[in-house]
């Protein structure tokens, strides 16, 4: 792999964290190019020595052209339709290629995964797919300070916003479904570790159909997240009760575009990630503890 080529990835919550690590550790080795929608943020990236290309995920020709010039491409999970009514004993293992190969094409993101894996099998590129589960924690760093990177994830903030608007914490169904979780800093370290391993070639790691790398370091039920949100709401005087209630059909339409995906099950074990040297630190108790500062941050931004 030769230096001086482009590293292209899609800037977002995870992408911003990965970019920050690249700037601090690997910038002398590569020219870095990012794809993003916002021209203002593109200007803010200039002092960091990062090249920006304006576009969206729909600009497939542009993305294909940039990716074809790159040595490494970062394109920053497995669910069911439980609707919060039950959990599951099915646990996916990133070290079990045969189990993952049985996933139907109808699963979310699966068609993209299969296309990426096919490109590896046909010899066009070596691919490494990172699946990071429920990401939590407020991202920090110079890119956040510059207003370039979004400091928040999606799932927990979405529940908080809905709860603030309805005056009580909410959940899909009874909140019995289970998801894995991972702190933003830990998942960034996963990307960084894979980057360094690929770059140095000191360790042979799986790619293609054996190149799934899960990001998880604990599990939670949706109810526990909603209940913790409710407790903070009550402490802050945002709700009379700390007990979450089920979102109505109308609320699902209003807050989540009618989707019950937050009530789905997604269980996994990151054995391949850990075998590649990943050592996550934050656990489920840290995820629950992160909810209060997340709410404080969101309330601080209300006019």
Image (spheres, rainbow, N blue to C red):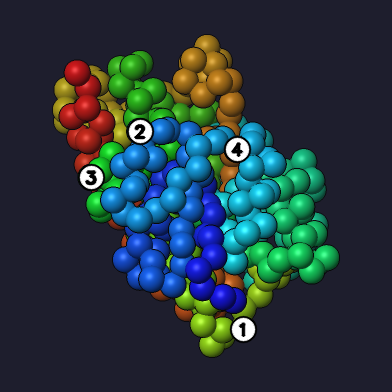
Q: Earlier in the sequence, mark 3 or mark 1?
A: 3
Q: Give the residue pinned by disc 3.
A: 145
Identify which residue is drawn at 38% across, 66% down: 27
Alpha carbons under labels 3 and 1: distance apart: 37 Å
Q: Residue 230 sits in which quadrant?
A: top left
- Callout 3: SS: helix
Q: Residue at x 35, y 62 (%)?
A: 23
- Name the disc covering residue 204, or none: 1
**Mark 1 vs mark 2, CA separation in Å:** 40 Å
Q: Secondary structure at mark 1?
A: loop
Examine the image and state in which quarter residue 187 appears.
Answer: bottom left
Q: Are marks 4 and 3 in contact (CB under 8 Å)?
A: no
| Quadrant of the frame with the C terminus | top left
Look at mark 2 in the image and give the residue it sits on. 40
Choose between 81 and 188: the one closer to the eye: 188
Q: Residue 21 location, x and y as percent?
A: 36, 63
For residue 128, which numbered disc appears in the image? none
Q: Nearer the viewer, mark 1 or mark 2?
A: 2
Tag 1: Cα neighbours inside 10 Å, few (<14), some, or many (≥20)? few
In the visual, does 189 lie left or right of 72? left
Residue density around tag 4, few if under 14, some if 14–19, many if 20 or more, within 10 Å: few
Tell me whether circle 4 and circle 1 mark residues in contact (CB < 8 Å): no
* Residue depth check, mark 4 versus mark 1: number of the one nearer the observer: 4
Q: CA distance from mark 2 to mark 4?
A: 18 Å
Q: Which residue is mark 4?
A: 57
């Amino acid at each position: 792999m030769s230096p001086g080529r482009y590293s292209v990835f899609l800037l977002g919550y995870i992408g911003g964290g990965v970019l920050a690590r690249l700037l601090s550790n690997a910038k002398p080795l590569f020219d870095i190019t990012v794809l993003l929608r916002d021209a203002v943020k593109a200007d803010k990236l200039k002092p960091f020595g990062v090249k920006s290309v304006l576009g969206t995920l729909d600009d497939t020709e542009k993305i294909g052209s940039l990716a074809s010039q790159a040595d490494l491409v970062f394109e920053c999970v497995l669910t069911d339709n439980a609707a919060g009514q039950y959990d599951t004993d099915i646990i996916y293992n990133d070290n079990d290629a045969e189990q993952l190969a049985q996933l139907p094409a109808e699963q979310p993101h699966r068609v993209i995964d299969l296309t990426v894996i096919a490109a590896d099998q046909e010899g066009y590129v070596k691919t490494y797919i990172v699946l990071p589960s429920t990401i939590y924690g407020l991202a920090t760093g110079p890119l956040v300070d510059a207003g370039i990177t979004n400091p928040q994830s999606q799932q927990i903030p979405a529940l908080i916003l809905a709860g603030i608007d309805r005056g009580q914490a909410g959940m899909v169904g009874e909140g019995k479904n289970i998801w894995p979780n991972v702190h933003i800093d830990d998942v960034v370290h996963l990307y960084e570790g894979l980057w360094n391993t690929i770059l140095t070639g000191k360790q042979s790691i799986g790619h293609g159909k054996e190149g799934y790398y899960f990001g998880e370091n604990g599990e939670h039920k949706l109810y526990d997240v909603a209940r913790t949100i409710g407790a903070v709401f009550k402490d802050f005087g945002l709700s009379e009760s700390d007990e979450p209630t089920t979102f109505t059909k109308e609320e699902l339409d209003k807050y989540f575009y009618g989707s019950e995906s937050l009530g789905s099950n997604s269980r996994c074990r990151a054995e391949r990630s850990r075998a590649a040297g990943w050592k996550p630190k934050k656990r489920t108790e840290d995820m629950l503890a992160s909810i209060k500062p997340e709410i404080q941050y969101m309330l601080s931004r209300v006019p």
